[in-house]
Each structure stands twice: as structure tokens, then as C-alpha cells.
Image (tube, rainbow, N blue to C red):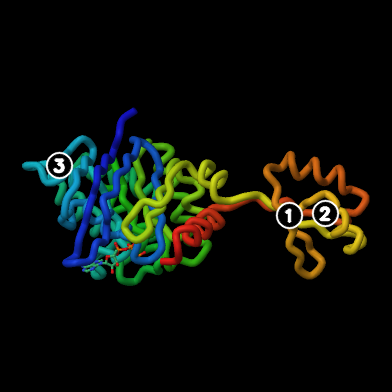
Amino acid sequence: MKFAIQVDKLRKQYGEHRAVKGISFTVEEGTLFAFLGANGAGKSTTIEILCTLLEKTSGTVKINGHTLDASNDNAEIRKSIGVVFQQSLLDERLTVRENILHRGKTYGLSRGQLAENYQFVSTYLHLEDIEKRKYGTLSGGQKRRADIARALIHRPKILFLDEPTTGLDPQTRQFVWQAIKQLQLETNMTVFLTTHYMEEAAVAHHVIVLKQGEIVAEGTPDALKTKYAYDSMALVFHNSAEGSKWLKDNAISYTEKLGIYTIRVDSTLHALDLLKKAEPFIASFEVIKGTMDDVFLHIMAEEGAA
Ligand SMILES: Nc1ncnc2c1ncn2[C@@H]1O[C@H](COP(=O)(O)OP(=O)(O)OP(=O)(O)O)[C@@H](O)[C@H]1O
């Protein structure tokens, strides 16, 4: 197994404030890695350190085999990563194409290589319709596409994205997110992202939940869902009194709201088993799968609200 990122006991202190408290984790090459956390958890601080933009207080960090803060390594790290932050870095007065090509030149790419790379980013981010427009005139979603294209022009091994879809409308968010996922899958690039959207974290290979500078949970989305979320089943009975009696007689705990009885189930098969037994009483039912939202809420509640 090859690691794109290795972080060991990373700490960051702003004066007296301990923003990151000795976290350790690894990111496998070619995976999509999601960093979750409530506001102020330390996500941006961590990502800025990994991208060489902020000095760490202590700990070791390796990016693509280069050790952060070792001689010349930070320059090598910068060449091998692409970064998209919440604030854009593109020039409002230049066209999208000019902005991206200008960025490519700062990496010393040859004319041929630059043209090839531009074609690559343009295809993935669908730049055809916006490349001739000035960056300052674009919508939020169009800007985001250009931001990501700029970060990819030198074909980095790792793409860092700090809340890439925050503030976008749902349709644009979906579009940008599809492009990121497709890129990751088809080019085997490592993608490290912070996000507030649980459905985005749900498709990551690995998720870390950060709280007040510490890792409070990590694993695959499935493992986290198994541990922190559960499936439930909503039942409507022909006769509520008879239905609730059946639940009580079978020692099944439930909550009830407006005649809908919700019970916890271990799995879909468990739900099926219960349905067979309670069939004479049931007018309708719905099995509700546990979500990453449940995971996040559960972890936040468990560890005390931020
Ligand atoms: N330059 C700074 N000086 C002092 N404290 C800071 C500085 N930058 C961040 N902090 C503090 O460090 C903690 C972590 O902040 P950080 O921005 O990394 O969190 P975050 O998880 O990215 O939050 P958000 O989701 O709101 O962006 C917060 O308590 C924040 O107030």
C-alpha cells in the first residue's frame, strides 16, 4: 500500500489556542479522503499545513514521499499538489483560459505540455462554454469549475479541496461534485477534501471526523454507519391500538408521531422478518437507511456539542 499523505502527531497552536492537538492519519494513493468536522474543528488549519501554506507547531508530515519542512521538499510538495481554497485566486480581469494558462506557465510547463494539460482539464471541467469569458463575470458554479481547473493544470498527484461546493446551488453542487468524482476515478488521483455535506463524505473511501482539534472517529463510510447510525422502519397500522399492543407484546421499543410508529432495525433482513410477523396489523411501511448525517450528529452528540 502506498501513501500519498502521512501525518504523525501533528500539532498547531495559535498563541495559547491549540487548534490541532496531535493528530495522526494516512491517506492511501488514489483514494478519495474526506475530512469532516464542525466549524472551528481545525480542518482548514490542517489542510493549510499539508499544503505548505501554514507552519506547523510540531509533528511530521509526508506528502508524496517528501517530508514537510525538510530542505527543498516544500517546493517539491507544491509541485505535486493542487489546491482549491474557499476564496478564489484567479484574476477577475482575465479570461478563464488566460488565468489557467498563466498558472501553467508558473510551473515551467513547455508549450506542448501546457496545451495537452489544458485540453485535459477543459474536458473534465467542461470549460468550453466559459473559457473565453472574464473570470469576474462568471456565476459561482462556473468560477468553481475554473478554480479546480487552475489547480489541476500541472497534473498534480493530490488535489486538496477545502469545502469545494459550499455556497453552490444543489444542481451546480452536483455538477462540480460529479466532475471531482470522475477525475478521481479515471485518473487515480488522490483527492483530499473537507466538506460540510454528509452525502459527499458518504462516497469517500475513508472519512475522518475532527472535533476541537482531535480525531474523534474514522473509517470507511460503511464502517462509520454501522457504528454510529442505524436503519429504522416506519410503520402505519390499520388500527394503532392493536399495532402498538403488538409492539409492546413483542418487547419492541418505538417512537410514535402522528400515527407513524418508528422502530430500530438491525438490517433490512431484520425488517423483513418483523414485517412477516406483524403483517396482519400493517397498513404501510418504509425502511429508512442510516445516513452519514446520523453518523455526524451521533458523534457530535456523543462527544459533547462543539
Ligand atoms: N490565525 C489564527 N489565529 C488564531 N486562531 C485561529 C487562527 N486560525 C484559526 N484559528 C482558530 O483555530 C481553530 C480551528 O480553525 P479552522 O479554521 O482550522 O477550523 P475549520 O474546521 O476549518 O472550521 P470551518 O469549518 O469554520 O472552516 C478555531 O478555533 C479558529 O478560531
Residue 260: percent from left, percent from top:
79, 63
User: At x 36% / y 45%, what residue is drawn?
Assistant: 191
Looking at the picture, does residue 153 appear above or below residue 294? Answer: above
- Secondary structure at numbered mark 3: helix
Ligand 1 location (quadrant): bottom left
Cα distance, mark 3 to mark 1?
54 Å
- Going by the numbered disc 1, the residue's amino acid type is Ile
Instruction: Report the residue that reaches farthest toward the left.
Output: 71
Residue 235 placed where, x, y %?
Answer: 80, 57
State the mark number for residue 76: 3
Distance from Cα at disc 2 to Cα at disc 1: 9 Å
The kind of residue tagged 2 is Leu
Do residues under tags 2 and 1 come within 8 Å of each other at their CB atoms? yes
Mark 3 and mark 1 residues within 8 Å of each other at the beta carbon: no
Q: Which residue is mark 1?
A: 263
The reply to whether residue 126 is in sight is no
